[in-house]
Amino acid sequence: WHIYWRNPGESGMPTSIEWRLPKGVTAGPIQWPAPHRFTAGGLTTYVYDKETVLLAPLKLASDLPAGLLELAAKVSWLECNEVCVQGNADLKANLAVGQQSQPTAEAGLIDSWRKQAPVPNPALQAQARWEKPPTDESGVLLIAGMAKDGFQPKDFLAYEDPSYEVSPAIEMLAPDQGKFRLRAKLKRLAPAFPKEVAGILIQPGKDGRAPVAFEVNLTLPNVGPAPQAPAPSAGAGTAATKAVAAAGSPSLLLMLGLALVGGLILNVMPCVLPVIALKVLGFVNQSREMPERVRKLGVIYGLGVLASFLVLATTVIAVQQAGGSASWGMQMQNPYFRLALVIVVTLVALNLFGLFEVTVGGTALGAAAQLASKEGAAGAFFNGVLATALATPCTAPFLTVALGFAFTQSPAVIVLMFVATALGLAAPYVVLSWQPKWLRFLPKPGDWMVKFKVAMGFPMLATAVWLFDLTAPSFGQGGALWLGLLLVLLALTAWIWGEFVQRGSRRKGLAMVTCLLLLGFGYTFGLEGQLHWRSPAGATSSLGVIKDSPDGIEWRPWTPAGVQQARVQGHPVLVDFTAKWCLTCKSNKKLAIDTAPVRAKLKEINALA
């Protein structure tokens, strides 16, 4: 059995420590002793297979009072042999703070392992240079240094870095004028080759003793930007990919253009189609109104879209600044957002069916649905918000490239990219509102609008059903039943409100009280009592083998240990990084991945999915 070094190599996962420390105590980085190589299934990893102590320095504030401090940490690791097991442990220890230092029983053990942690040795005078100018994505490094005190390193292990990787195939060359020499192949993972490479030089231990290792930071000669790969041949890839390849590194103007076009295409994606129905009704109603009012409502709709995208951009920036990972549509991963959205869309559908009508003033029950169908400033703005909320589960051609670029840029560029997407999404309606002559081609208002309004309630209801399917698993085993009953209760409340409060002439007070009681019961018994909405269970994962069709790809549930075990056994691994709410992902999977040629190829190379 073994665990992994800070750079696990071609597979594996390093041990991590998540500290929970009292105020005035901070933890430094882990001090890793030198590992050794382990090769299995054609993969080389850097591991520890005996007792190993990982040290982490603690820094104490000078004004800490004397006494005991509780230190807590969550440790996660991956241990492998023929199979891999994910390990976790919550650890606690007491630290005595006082005026005098007194060694503990473990002081000797700590000191011996501290000596095994590689440290810099200036006497080595280690240097690196390119054997010849690197081409395309890789180059060969020559590492040399003074062989002081018998130190003859046979290996170089690079620290993990997102901008490059060093091949585990290190070649030891013959010494030259008292200098050790190693050859290593470096592959860039960024647009340019690195300016320095950090890692450790290792001389294996003899007679069971620990290896001798020193830390080095090798400065590399500047070779300028890496050569660009040739553009794909005609007909290969999408138009967006060709545009980016032709430009070399993507320019901001090009990406803004892709975001604008992608936002425009979002208007015909299935996620946004229900809102288009509302806008069609709105334009029919506005076709006989004053042009100034039509323009005003068009601009307000655009402002609703723009404000919503600015909120999304702010959220993305906040997540990234906090050290998290942000992505398009990430709010759909939040069960609270999905719960609110399924309720709002259900109310909009009920309003289109005529269960309750829009009245000036509104109420808490119908506010969202009334806003969505109301012909006025508030309705136009909310339609923009609703269009954005329903657009995020979809991506459009060009938009994926633009957003992928945006999430790697500065906050200012992220805001610009989201604004460009918002302008594309809002553009058709804003342009129509500023061209009243084009509205003449719409039919005249009449009874057909009532039937059309009811008919458009069905795609809105279909959207609610889809959102229901996404939301229910987040609330436990009975989530589907209780969320369904809650929506039925909401529909009953909407009907009572429309039938007896808005259209009735008697006992309106009793009907209003009944609505309030039903809402209170739904919240107390449904949301709080059964769904436990304050602490959702989270998305559930299927167990065992997953098949999308009788002859489909056999998808296994994702686990780091499962992937590691497959790679150790020599299986290529296909990972489906997707989301249940991502309609575009599902379409791509069905049309381009889960196909007969792909299944045949996976079987041919003995791959696991």
Image (spheres, rainbow, N blue to C red):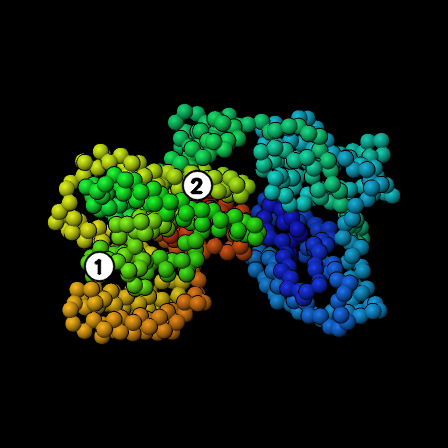
User: Mark 1 packing: few (<14 Cα in 10 Å), some, or many (20+)?
Assistant: many
Q: Is residue 173 above or below residue 77?
A: above
Observer-nearest residue: 154 or 472? Answer: 472
Image x and y of residue 497, in percent: 23, 66
- Residue 115 appears in the picture as rendered: yes
Tell which circle, 1 or 2, labels the residue nearer the N-terminal end: 1
Residues 587 and 25: in front is 25
Quarter in which the N terminus is drawn = bottom right
Q: Secondary structure at mark 1?
A: loop
Q: On the image, which quarter does residue 515 sit in?
A: bottom left
The label nearer to you, 1 versus 2, is 1
Residue 53 placement, left or right of 585: right
Look at 71% across and 63% down and name the residue there: 24
Q: Amino acid at mark 2?
A: Val
Q: Which residue is mark 2?
A: 419
Q: Can residue 594 be seen from the camera position used here? A: no
**Which x, y percent locates residue 398?**
40, 36
Q: Residue at x 35, y 57 (%)?
A: 341
Residue topped by disc 1: 357
Instruction: Point out which mark residue 282 bears.
Output: none
Q: CA distance from mark 1 to mark 2?
A: 34 Å
The one of 448 and 325 positioned closer to us in this rendering: 448
Does residue 13 appear to the left or right of 572 in the view shown?
A: right
